[in-house]
Image (cartoon, helix red, strand yellow):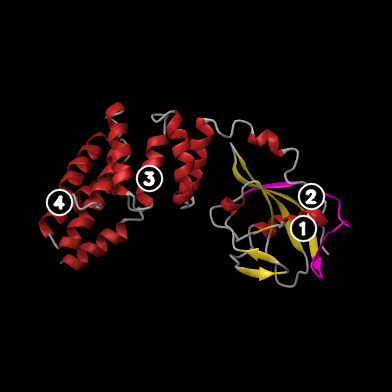
Amino acid sequence: MKPLLLFIAAFLFSVHMAYGQKDGLYFDKKYYECENKWVALPQKEGENTYIYGFVYLDGTAGYTFDVQGNFSVNNGKFSKDTTQRESSLKYRLPKRYALLAILPDSALKQMALPKEPDWLKIYREGEDNTDRLVNKGFLLNDVEASAEAIPVLLKAYAKDPHYKGLEFELAFAYNATEQYTKAIEVLKNALSVDPENFMFYRELGYSYLHTKNATEAEKLYTKGISISKDDDQSAEMAFNMAGHYHGLKDKVNFAKWAATAKKYMKDTSPIKPYLEKMETELK
């Protein structure tokens, strides 16, 4: 068998998404569902052992997998591989990663693993501080886990609703989970304190578009674009309005907003082909 240190890095970034059950392990958890848990990776083809480790949240690096070693399962008994020197390799987990299995308590007992490693307390210090909660909410939004981000962000919101970045992340999470009226409430309060934040207008315009209030959305996007210092965001706001009028087959208003989107849109923008497709369809 190859030494763990030689193949673990390649394995971590080559493993494909997996789902299923084997040896009493259920590979059905995304890594953010495994925070502060011992986990196993699905086996690679041809391997008869599992890689195991601990998933935790590093306030600076994000979700991290602390790889500990290998284990095997024989007749339901979990056994650590003692032929390799124990090590601890830390890897920041990418957005898309294999589904993991949380090790059951019986496995922890058989493998003589503590409920949590002693070193974890260092990373958990201050985990309920507002800045840490907002950062965690951002990380969850970033991996499309907005439903999980909401309770985290609400905990911070109860302490300091106007903390930098918090209101946007909470509104984004509400919009992503189609709770548009809640997003509107958060953003209105946010704008009462910071009326020149163009990202609030971007998110609020989106909320109103999805509550069938295109007139208000258009006002908000117009304001947002007028104060925006980010061409990509300006292009996105204009694109959203163009998409609305495309759906209505309103060629005049579509053309107006499409022209605005093009004014700010880069040639490499991911929205460019979609805008061109809408233009073709309306012609």
Label 1 and label 3: CA atoms lie apart by 39 Å
Residue for point 28% across, 47% down = 207
Mark before the other along the chain sequence, 4 or 1 = 1
Q: Are marks 2 and 1 in contact (CB under 8 Å)?
A: yes
Magenta span contains residue 80: yes
Question: Real-space Cα distance between discs 2 and 1?
Answer: 8 Å
Taking the image as shown, residue 164 lies to the left or right of residue 278, namely right
* Mark 2 touches mark 4? (CB < 8 Å): no
User: What residue sits 57% from the left and 50% below the top?
Assistant: 32
Please state which amino acid type lies under the numbered disc 4. Lys
Q: Secondary structure at mark 4?
A: helix
Q: Looking at the image, is mark 2 or mark 4 earlier in the sequence?
A: 2
**Real-space CA distance between mark 3 and mark 4, rounded to the nearest whole angstrom:** 27 Å
- Disc 1 is placed on an element classified as helix
Magenta region, residue range: 73-92
The mark that comes first in sequence, 3 or 2, is 2
Residue located at (25% from left, 45% from top): 205
Circle 1 residue:
107
* Image x and y of residue 56, in percent: 64, 45
Q: Nearer the viewer, residue 165 or 21?
A: 21
Along the line of sight, the residue nearer the viewer: 108 or 253: 108
Q: Is residue 262 visible?
A: no
Name the residue tied to disc 3. 172
Q: According to the image, label 4 marks what residue?
A: 256
Q: Is residue 191 visible?
A: yes
Residue at (37, 47) in percent of width and height: 174
Residue 199 position in % (x across, y down): 32, 38
Q: Which residue is mark 2?
A: 113
The residue type indicated by label 2 comes to: Leu
Disc count in the image?
A: 4
